[in-house]
Image (spheres, grey):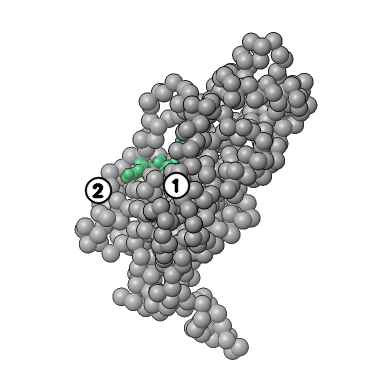
């Protein structure tokens, strides 16, 4: 059921609509996924398939509107769902999906409330969406539709999709949400349902593979700097002041690394990807003592997933099965206090945990643009007949990627990358490991993951 997509209500000189001849993406357009040819596996940030670092060209579908579309817009029912934790820009993406669907001529657009839960909790009703409803959503953080974790069997969700007559499902979420979206896509295929399931990756953690970044990340970094700046001011205004800021990042330290770099106020940056020890020689506490004795103050930025091996495990999980982490921020705060008490040196520790404040704010300008492009491309992808894909930006180009490829593992900071080395140069911190563990660094350097 292919048709022609008119690019908006453009008018000729006489006020009559006309068809845009340019501006479409050709189905065979591709973007190159990797753009560096590494000469050696030891080269900074290298990702190699063999010791020679053989060059493998990997191409992905270019995103954007196609001249031929797969659905008849007036017959389409489209649904949007937002799952997982909050992220700046969710409302911007919802808004752009609705705008773009309406441009195609889709009339039947609904929001599924509170994540996947909205598909199976009978107390929750779908929300009709239109330009009028979503017009000002971008002015606020959060999700207009609500979010949730956990629950819902894929079978039941697909039963619900079938019963509601949904043709296009736009799924905004992180790794877990995308795993769900892929399972929904597979089940729809198994039942031979003509449903396009298209993802838009959402995560302040920036932990989705293959993409330059995910929406919400820039805003999170910018907001994190406010907390870092407060910690810096507190630390520098106190006698032997130590500021400690904990930021989100369950398994990836991107927010912590980028906020540390951009603020320029961090002396010690701790992320999940790089092991460290607190006690003993080469430990964080000893370096902190050195900073207090030489500079008089210090600021530490730690990702929530860092140093988990130093803490007692709770083994508890959230509703989605994600491990509930022990609080590394509180732990470090206590360790600093008792260390300085033990050596008889005054230390004034101020601990700031801005995590939810960072996640709940509205998107900044650069994320607002990214959300606009991703939201619009999600709709173009569905109309092109794609399913089981997600939208992203790779090497500055907008593309569609198969969901399994981007969620195979969480994307992590490569400790051998130039960016981590820039961070170390900026903070001036040493490696917080003793000689025995220094072999672990060598392992990390050679491991592209
Ligand atoms: N493997 C899976 N198959 C089907 N559904 C899943 C799977 N993993 C997670 N989900 C569902 O996806 C939704 C979101 O998952 P989760 O809470 O892990 O958030 P997320 O999308 O990873 O976002 P965040 O980055 O905020 O953690 C939940 O409703 C969860 O039940
Ligand atoms: O407290 P919640 O809502 O489960 O979310 C916390 C999680 O959200 C994330 O930011 C991902 O969205 C993780 O880094 C963090 O562990
Ligand atoms: Mg997740």
Q: Quadrant of residue 319?
A: top left
The answer to whether 438 is drawn above or below residue 71 in the figure is above
Residue that extends furthest to the bottom in the rendered view of this protein: 14
Residue named by callout 2: 155
Closest to the observer, 445 or 311: 445
The answer to whether 188 is drawn above or below residue 333 in the figure is below
**If the picture is divided into quarters, which one holds ligand 1?**
top left
Residue 38 image point, x, y percent: 49, 57
* Marker count (numbered): 2
Residue 216 image point, x, y percent: 55, 49
Graded by Cα atoms within 10 Å as few (under 14), some (14 to 19) or many (20 or more), the crowding at tag 1 reads some
Closest to the observer, 363 or 296: 296
Q: In what element is the residue under mark 2?
A: helix
* Residue at x 46% of width, y 65% of height: 32
Estimate the spatial distance between the alpha carbons at disc 1 and disc 2, rounded to whole Å: 37 Å
Relative to 355, 442 lies left or right: left
Q: Which mark is residue 448?
A: 1
Do the CB atoms of the residues marked 1 and 2 lie less than 8 Å apart? no
* Residue at x 67% of width, y 45% of height: 262
Residue 97 image point, x, y percent: 48, 61
Graded by Cα atoms within 10 Å as few (under 14), some (14 to 19) or many (20 or more), the crowding at tag 2 reads few
* Residue at x 50% of width, y 36% of height: 441
Relative to 196, 372 lies left or right: right
């Amino acid at each position: 059921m292919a048709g022609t997509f008119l690019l908006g209500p453009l008018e000729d000189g006489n006020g009559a609509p006309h068809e845009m001849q340019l501006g479409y993406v050709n189905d065979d357009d591709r973007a190159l996924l990797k753009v560096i040819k590494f000469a050696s596996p030891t080269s900074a940030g290298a990702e190699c398939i063999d010791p020679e670092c053989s060059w493998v060209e990997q191409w992905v579908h270019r995103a954007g509107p196609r001249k031929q579309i797969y659905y008849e817009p007036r017959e389409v029912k489209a649904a949007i769902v937002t799952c997982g934790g909050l992220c700046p820009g969710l409302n911007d993406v919802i808004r752009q999906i609705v705008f773009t669907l309406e441009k195609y001529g889709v009339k039947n657009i609904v929001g599924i409330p509170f994540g996947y839960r909205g598909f199976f909790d009978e107390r929750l009703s779908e929300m009709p969406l239109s330009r009028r409803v979503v017009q000002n959503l971008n002015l606020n953080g959060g999700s207009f539709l609500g979010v949730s974790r956990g629950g819902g069997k894929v079978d039941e969700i697909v039963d619900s999709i079938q019963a509601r007559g949904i043709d296009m499902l736009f799924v905004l979420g992180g790794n877990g949400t995308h795993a769900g979206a892929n399972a929904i896509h597979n089940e729809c295929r198994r039942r031979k349902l003509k449903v396009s399931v298209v993802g838009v990756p959402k995560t302040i953690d920036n932990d989705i593979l293959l993409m330059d970044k995910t929406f919400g990340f820039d805003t999170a970094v910018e907001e994190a700097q406010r907390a870092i700046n407060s910690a810096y001011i507190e630390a520098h205004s106190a006698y032997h002041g130590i500021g400690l800021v904990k930021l989100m990042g369950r398994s990836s330290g991107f927010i912590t690394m980028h906020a540390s770099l951009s603020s320029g106020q961090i002396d010690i940056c701790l992320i999940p990807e790089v092991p460290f020890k607190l006690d003993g020689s080469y430990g964080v506490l000893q370096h902190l003592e050195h900073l207090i004795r030489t500079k008089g103050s210090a600021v530490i930025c730690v990702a929530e997933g860092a140093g988990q091996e130093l803490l007692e495990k709770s083994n508890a999980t959230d509703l989605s099965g994600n491990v509930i982490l022990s609080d590394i921020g509180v732990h470090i705060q206590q360790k600093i206090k008792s260390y300085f008490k033990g050596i008889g040196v005054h230390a004034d520790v101020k601990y700031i945990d801005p995590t939810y404040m960072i996640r709940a704010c509205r998107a900044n300008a650069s994320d607002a643009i990214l959300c606009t492009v991703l939201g619009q491309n999600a709709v173009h992808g569905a109309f092109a007949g794609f399913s089981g894909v997600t939208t992203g930006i790779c090497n500055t180009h907008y593309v569609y990627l198969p969901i399994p490829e981007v969620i195979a593992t969480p994307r992590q900071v490569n400790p051998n990358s130039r960016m981590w080395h820039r961070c170390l140069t900026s903070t001036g911190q040493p490696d917080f490991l003793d000689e025995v563990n220094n072999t672990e660094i060598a392992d990390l350097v050679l491991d592209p993951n």
